[in-house]
Structure formats: structure tokens, C-alpha cells
Amino acid sequence: PAICRAIKNEQAEKDEAEQARMLYVAMTRARDWLMLSGSPVPGKQSWMQTFDELYGVCGSNDGAVIEGQSGGWSAVVRRTCPGDTSWNAAPHAHPGNVHQALWKELERRAGPVDAVAAARKTFSVSELLAAIFKTADEEEPRDAEQSQPDPAARERMFRGTLVHRMFERWDFSGDPPLDAVLAEECLDPARRSMFETTLRDIAAKFNKSPLARRFTSCPIQREVPFYLNLGGGLVHGVIDAVLEDGAVVLDYKTGRPGGTMAGRYEFQLRLYAAAVARLLGRTPQQGILYYADHGDIHEVDLSHESVEDVLRRAAEAIADLRNRRTRGALL
């Protein structure tokens, strides 16, 4: 439909603008010389096509000099590699003298870099949990390297996203903002009605729980992002809610209380508690898993021993993931 084409066109314009900003930043970091290489027949919508439209680069002869319209810079077009000569030009000499450069040295600097297995630096919480518990959580978005879920799992993931979004935007002093949450998804009438019924039921259960009164009487930080330095890497994630200036960490779940994922969820909350302790300098006193579909509150032990055990296992998982990356690069 037309709305999809309009959205795609707008996204394409944003992507093109972002690419242009990245190219500008890259080009303006040059100190003495800037070397750009491209095809003599530029691809459509490529940066080389833009250069050709502005300066006629592709139609210029070898050695042609291009002057900047606003002054302050000039460039030389090369279609052949000059022979080896000594370097005589001053760092800011006119680019027409670039043939005086030691060409092999320039080629070496601009040539491909030998492939080296880079040590991984960042790991998502969901990636660590999948590595430790050997299974993925169907409520969580997948990392790029993880396999995509089947349609039924995608639907459960989407439902979980809507529930989290409702709690994120709800100020708990009135009704939940269902219209705003659902309007963003452009759902057909039948699906919208189904999800609206689901969210209303979940909101009604929450209003009957002790958490509702607590949420209206204490400061709440929602969707708190963090990085946790652990095992030589950075673990990153987002905590659903932090209450009472770090005294309480809370995570919303749409699964079944006490199910097969319970151990994973408790591990996750303890990892969140460790992150809050590092960030705020105080260890949370209470960890809560709130199972939204059932209105069930499950408290998680955040004792020093339990949190330290989680940090140890997470550091081991990071080391294992790094080793897998290195072995894959060597193979």
C-alpha cells in the first residue's frame, strides 16, 4: 500500500543522509592527503556517482586537477600508478605534485590489512543467557548472530514487546496508554482488538497487585540501559524497572511462573542487581520477577553469594564465547 511505500522512501532518505554524514566525517579526518578509490563506472546511488555529478571525476583524464568550488582544497585524478619517485613535496603541497610521492609507501598504507581475529569486547545479556542455559528466551529480541524464531515464537516475542511497552509508558496514576502503544504497530482491526483485550486484562491484574500501590508511591526508573565490565568484556542490557533509588530491581515476564525458564530469569535478575551495584555503589535489597499474564510476584534471592556466583558463571561464558570466536577465525 501507499503508506508502506512512503515509509520506505522516508527510511531510504534517512539512510542516504546518514551515509553522507559518515562519508563527510571520514573525509574531514585526513591530515595531509586524502586518497579515494572508486570504479570508473560508478554504481547508481553510490558516493562515487555523487562525486562524478559534482566534479566530473569519471570523465577526467589522468593528472587532471579539480579545484574546490569554495576554495581551500584541490584534488588530482589518477588513472594509472606513477613510477617510484622520491618524496619531495611538502605535506600541504598542491596535489598536482602527488606523483612525487613514494608511491609504494602510499600503496602500503592504503592497502588491505592482514586479517586478525579481533577479541570480542561486548556481549548482550540475552547472548550470555543463551550460552549458559543453552536455550533462547522467546520473549526477547534476537541478536544478529542468533537464528530467527519460527512464526509462533515471533508472535510471542511481539506480544511480550507490547506488554513491556505498556509498562514502560504507563504512569500508573490512570489507565494504561493502550491507544498509543497499539497505534505504532499499524495492526489490522482483528489483531488490534485481540492485543487490546490482552493488555487490558494484564493491566487489571497489575492494578490488583501490591506492586500497583508501590509504583504510585516511589520513584521509578524505566528501561535502564547499562554496561557491566566483566571478564575483560562489557555486558550490556536494559533493566525493565529500578525502584527506590536502586533498592529494588524488577523485570516483567509474560511466561508461566515457575516454568522451565525460572532459573534463567533469576540468573538474569541477579546480573541486573550486579550492574546496579556497580553503577550506584549500593546492592539492591530486593529482586522481583513480575509475571504479567498471571499477576504473580516472585522474589529473587539477591544475597552476596548468589550474585557473585552469577558473575563467575557469566565471566566463564564470556571466555567461552571469545574462544569460539577465535577458533572460528583460525579455521
Image (spheres, rainbow, N blue to C red):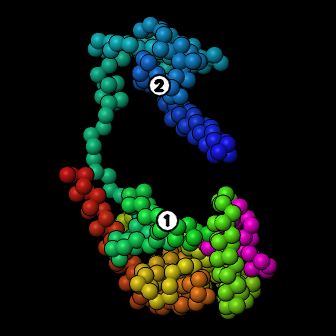
Name the side, left or right, on which 298 lies relative to 260.
right
The reply to whether residue 140 is in sight is no
Inter-mark Cα distance, 1 to 2: 37 Å
**Label annotation for residue 154:** 1
Q: Which residue has dot 2 on it?
A: 43
Give the crowd class for mark 1: few <14, some 14-19, many >=20 residues within 10 Å.
some
For residue 50, above or below residue 245: above
Foreground disc of the pair 1, 2: 1
- The residue sitting at 36% across, 73% down in the picture is 135
Left or right of residue 1, residue 157 in this image: left
Amino acid at pointer 2 = Gly
Q: Name the residue nearer the viewer: 303 or 193.
A: 193
- Measured from the top left, where is residue 252 in percent x and y? 57, 79
Q: Quadrant of residue 187?
A: bottom right
| Residue appearing at x 54%, y 13% in the figure | 56
When the figure is inspected, residue 224 is found, relative to residue 212, above or below; the finding is: above
Q: Residue furthest left?
A: 331
Magenta-colored span: 163-183
| Numbered circle sitting on residue 130 | none
Q: Are marks 1 and 2 in contact (CB under 8 Å)?
A: no
Q: Amino acid at mark 1?
A: Arg
Please provide percent x and percent y for residue 125.
45, 70
Give the percent coordinates (x, y) of residue 73.
57, 19
Q: Earlier in the sequence, mark 1 or mark 2?
A: 2
Is 273 drawn above or below residue 83 in the view shown? below
